[in-house]
Image (spheres, helix red, strand yellow):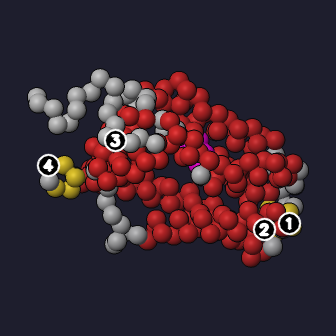
């Protein structure tokens, strides 16, 4: 374990991880921070033919908070590359930032194939595995336990409440229906192709949209 004033020199593996974090997270963080004048507001923020200010504020807040975490993660990685070393505090902050991001991924797992893809295609999933596999001995055990607990919180929340809190019923058909309702048919068709659905998907027991009332 590193001491509070010790530094870990960069190894090829650590350099590779830091470069990925700089490219992915610093890029996302900077983009999310400065995209105010050209951001595209989600379609679901339109109500009765006009923008709903409260919904747009809610979406923007979530967008900026995600950008803030990414910016911190990417900045620490960039500093490590410039200094050619990382302190214990920096590497522990990397662990914690990845745990926070992954907790959100676990707690909001999508139904069906989309859920698996939504996890394995996240860079933080693989970076966190690499960090635990190669750099766990350099951080304090308490910090490692906190990171594990944060991940477990996301998993436990999903298993106990996440399904019913997100999609009712928790099926891929409901996912497609909700995507179409929020973002339109074109985006829903993309989700259908990923899920392997050949035609318009409807939740079990729902009335077809073209059926007579």
Q: Which residue is mark 1?
A: 11
The structure residue drawn at horizontal position 39% and vertical position 26%, both measured from the top left corner, is 169
> How far from the left and from the top, in percent, is residue 11?
86, 66
Q: Which mark is residue 26?
A: none
Task: Rate crowding at label 4 as few (under 14), some (14 to 19) or many (20 or more) other CA atoms within 10 Å.
Answer: few
Whether residue 54 is situated above or below residue 11 in the rendered picture: above
Task: Rate crowding at label 1 as few (under 14), some (14 to 19) or many (20 or more) other CA atoms within 10 Å.
Answer: few
Magenta: predominant secondary structure element?
helix
Over which residues does the magenta segment extend?
101-105
Sequence-earlier tag: 3 or 1: 1
Whether residue 52 is situated above or below residue 113 in the rendered picture: below
Is residue 55 toward the left or the right of residue 73 in the image? left
**Residues at marks 3 and 2, CA–CA distance in whole angstroms:** 46 Å
In the image, 202 versus 41, the foreground residue is 202
Q: Which mark is residue 15?
A: 2
Is residue 2 toward the left or the right of residue 68 in the image? right
Nearer the observer: mark 3 or 2; the answer is: 3
Q: Are marks 2 and 1 in contact (CB under 8 Å)?
A: yes
The structure residue drawn at horizontal position 40% and vertical position 51%, both measured from the top left corner, is 190
Sequence-earlier tag: 2 or 4: 2
Q: Quadrant of the C terminus?
A: top left
> How far from the left and from the top, in percent, is residue 146?
70, 39
Q: Which residue is mark 3?
A: 199
Is residue 179 toward the left or the right of residue 47 in the image? right
**Residues at marks 3 and 1, CA–CA distance in whole angstroms:** 50 Å
Task: Rate crowding at label 2 as few (under 14), some (14 to 19) or many (20 or more) other CA atoms within 10 Å.
Answer: some
Q: Which residue is mark 4?
A: 48
Is residue 120 toward the left or the right of residue 45 in the image? right
**Residues at marks 4 and 1, CA–CA distance in whole angstroms:** 56 Å
Nearer the observer: mark 3 or 4; the answer is: 3
Magenta stretch holds residue 113: no
Secondary structure of the residue carrying tag 4 is loop
């Amino acid at each position: 374990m590193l001491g509070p004033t010790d530094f870990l020199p960069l190894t090829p593996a650590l350099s590779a991880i830091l470069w990925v974090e700089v490219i992915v997270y610093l890029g996302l963080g900077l983009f999310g921070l400065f995209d105010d004048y050209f951001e595209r507001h989600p379609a679901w923020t339109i109500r009765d033919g006009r923008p709903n200010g409260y919904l747009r504020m809610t979406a923007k807040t979530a967008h900026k908070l995600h950008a803030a975490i990414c910016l911190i993660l990417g900045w620490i990685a960039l500093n490590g590359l410039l200094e050619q070393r990382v302190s214990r505090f920096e590497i522990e902050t990397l662990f914690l930032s990845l745990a926070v991001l992954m907790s959100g991924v676990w707690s909001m797992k999508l139904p069906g194939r989309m859920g698996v893809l939504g996890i394995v295609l996240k860079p933080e999933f693989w970076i966190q595995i690499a960090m635990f596999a190669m750099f766990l001995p350099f951080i304090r055990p308490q910090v490692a336990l906190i990171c594990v607990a944060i991940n477990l919180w996301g998993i436990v929340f999903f298993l106990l409440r996440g399904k019913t809190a997100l999609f009712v019923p928790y099926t891929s058909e409901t996912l497609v229906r909700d995507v179409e309702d929020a973002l339109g048919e074109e985006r829903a068709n993309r989700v259908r192709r990923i899920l392997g659905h050949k035609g318009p998907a409807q939740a079990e027991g729902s009335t077809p949209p073209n059926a007579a009332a």
